Amino acid sequence: MEITGIGGFILLVLNVWAFVSIIGSKNSTGSKVLWCLLVLILPLLGFIIWLIAGPRSASSRA
């Protein structure tokens, strides 16, 4: 699947936002690395998975 134009730019911005949020989180280093790899390897699917599973799992533990 190829995403170009404005869709690709929007995906890039969302992925950068995800990276900043992941790195700034209080999770362990291993968890941060795994989330970053997931978003890097599968940009659209990884972002969606992080959006659904990432923040909720972190907030439910606190």
Image: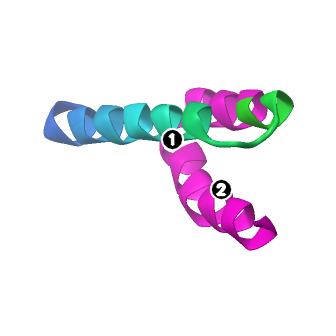
Q: Magenta stretch?
A: 33-62
Return the x and y of residue 18 as percentages of the image width and height: 48, 40
Tell me the colour scheme of the image. Answer: rainbow
**SS at mark 1 in the image:** helix
Give the farthest residue toward the left.
6
Nearer the observer, 17 or 58: 58
Return the x and y of residue 11 as percentages of the image width and height: 33, 40
Q: Pointer 2: what residue? A: 54
Type of amino acid at the residue the image marks with label 2: Gly
**SS at mark 2 in the image:** helix
Q: Pointer 1: what residue? A: 21
How many discs mark residues in the rendered view?
2
Type of amino acid at the residue the image marks with label 1: Ser
At a point 48% along the width and 45% down the height, the residue shown is: 44
Cα distance in 3D space between marks 2 and 1: 10 Å
Q: Is residue 38 left or right of residue 14?
A: right
Return the x and y of residue 33 as percentages of the image width and height: 74, 27
User: Does residue 47 belong to the magenta stretch?
Assistant: yes
